[in-house]
Image: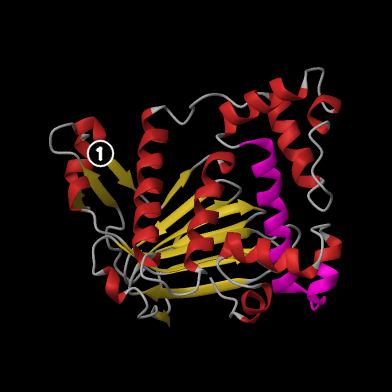
Amino acid sequence: MSENMESRSSATLAWDELQPVVWYANRMQCQPGFAFGPRVIDEHQFILVADGFGTAWIQGERYEAAPGSLFYYGPDTVHHFIADEEKPFLLYGLHFSWTGNYKEAGKGISIREVSFDPSVDAKQDNRYLIVDPEQPEGCLLITDIRTLSIERFEPRFARIAECYGMDESGFKASMLRGLLLELLAAMKQWDRQGNQGQPITPIIGAIAERLASHARERYDHRWLGEWSSYHPDHVARQFRAQLGVTPYDFFMSRKLQLAKDLLAHSELPLLDVADELEVGSIHNFTKWFKQHTGLPPGKFRSRSRFI
């Protein structure tokens, strides 16, 4: 632990003491200029910028938000976000507690609008330190902002949001706890690897972009060869090694996000959404969507939209 870390009084908890509870998780495509705050919450929150740009203030400190920015703040920490007018951000929001009773995970969240003047109002220490008493290098210090790999971390936030949207079940809260612990462990591994991990080559990065841009179509394995000078199977192996997911699963995750966007931000009938994404009949679309989100498309559309 560094001298600077010791000189301030950040909240501390050991890895084996973590019993996190997820209170709310969501994905939101913000409209141009969309803003929330200044506000405070009673829980802790991660905000991941998956795409787009904007500005964030945490206790009066200004940060430029870009893809890969992960923001953190705890209870009663004043925060304020404004999306860019030209390319507003796509956000994942995760409200949670570091410890708690998972049986209370349906209690809801508390949000209060406030004001903050950095020249007058006192700042609190917004850092959180997770420690391994036997291995100092195993510590994870969470601060206002850090930068993560979108390719590696967006799927983790997406899975948490999908799990939260499932119909109530006896294992849902336990699944959310496990997914959040996996996320924290992945953040520690990311730090330990010097924010590198296995590098993503330009070819694989370009193929990921093209798969995302073709997500309204039916998947075609031959694309991998057409978009590179290699055999499709070789490209698929490299894609999975670098991004941790197969090209098909990456493609279908982007198709699922398109489906969510169309349901949340358009009034297209469900049949038209299914046709737009080439996912077959309305029966097949409903079955596929519910399998991956836990909710039928109509119920997903009716949920409130806030972060």
Q: Where is residue 222 in the image (x, y as percent from the top left)?
A: 83, 31
Side of 46 relative to 248 (left or right): left
Instruction: Assign the magenta stretch its main secondary structure.
Output: helix
Q: Position of residue 39 (x, y in %)?
A: 44, 75
Side of 270 relative to 170 (left or right): right
Residue 133's place in the image compared with 36, above or below, is above
Side of 145 relative to 53 (left or right): left
Any part of residue 18 in sight: yes
Seen from the viewer's position, the closer of residues 120 and 174 is 174
Seen from the viewer's position, the closer of residues 8 and 226 is 226
**Dot 1, crowdedness within 10 Å: few (<14), some or many (≥20)?**
some
Q: Report if residue 292 lies within the magenta region.
A: no
Furthest-left residue in view? 134
Task: Give me the residue at 39% from left, 59% from top.
Answer: 175
Q: Where is residue 176 in the image (x, y as percent from the top left)?
A: 39, 60
Residue at which label 1 appears: 139
Any part of residue 9 in sight: no
Q: Position of residue 40 (x, y in %)?
A: 39, 74
- Find the magenta span and give its range: 246-273
Q: Tag 1, which secondary structure? A: loop
Task: Give me the residue at 23% from left, 54% from top.
Answer: 18
Seen from the viewer's position, the closer of residues 151 and 292 is 292
Residue 216's place in the image compared with 185, above or below, is below
Please, what is the three-letter code of the amino acid marked with disc 1? Cys
In which image quadrant can residue 68 be found? top right
Locate the N terminus by quadrant.
top left
Task: Give me the residue at 48% from left, 27% from top.
Answer: 197
